[in-house]
Image (tube, grey):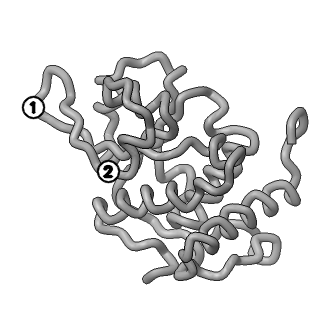
Amino acid sequence: MSGHSPTSSDLFAAAASVLEGLSDAGLTHLAPRPNLSECGGLSPENTVDLPFEISFIGGHASTFTGSSGDLFSTILSRGLGLRPNQVLQTTLQDSISRTEFLQQPAKLFVALGQEASQFLLGTSQPLADIQGRLQAVPIAHTQNVAWLLCTDHPADMVRDPSIKAKCWQDLLVGMKHLGLTPPAAK
């Protein structure tokens, strides 16, 4: 997919790959794949409106574009039942401080990949040591904390599909924190 815009076939292949990874991990409680071409894409029937915001923070500008962006969108819509306009998507290239990231109006921050995770936690620990756990991160100069969840970057999942199941388990921790159930498990 390098050097060209993704086609519908590319997007469906990426979605199928995510679902295969979830199925391989024993996560068969997810809803059957909708035929997006038949239903005209996302609709009120296969998404949910939620009264909260999640902030996804990636390490670099390509987090939400190309094959990484396609996979991220698939995880949002098919796995979590969210539309991109229901979450905040930022990257470290947005040139704001750690405190400014954590003061965004969100109930949960999800750091995508090692770079974003280390920046937001102020640590040099590898991602494997910090992912999948909710962490209360103090916000400088306030009495508040931000809830942070660290997980794999979509680009890493594109390169190594075997880590998709771990990422899904991480995201379930965040959904539980927010009191949500994946759409298909309801």
Q: Residues within 10 Å of mark 2 (few under 14, many from 20)?
A: some
The N terminus, quarter of image: top right
Q: Is 51 rendered above or below residue 153?
A: below
The tag earlier along the polypeptide, 2 or 1, is: 2
Q: Residue at x 40, y 46 (%)?
A: 131
Q: Nearer the viewer, mark 2 or mark 1?
A: 2
Observer-nearest of 93 and 137: 137
**Kind of residue sitting beneath label 1:** Gln
Q: Is 17 rendered above or below residue 4?
A: below
Residue 133: image tag: 2
Instruction: Locate residue 173: give its quadrant.
Output: bottom left
Q: Is residue 50 left or right of residue 145?
A: right
**Kind of residue sitting beneath label 2:** Arg
Q: Is residue 10 left or right of residue 137?
A: right
Name the secondary structure under disc 2: loop
Residue 33, given in percent of the width and then of the height, sits at: 69, 77
Q: Residue furthest left?
A: 143
Residue 5, given in percent of the width and then of the height, sits at: 86, 41
State the count of labels.
Answer: 2
Instruction: Locate residue 34: give its quadrant.
Output: bottom right
The C terminus, quarter of image: bottom left
Name the residue tied to disc 1. Answer: 143
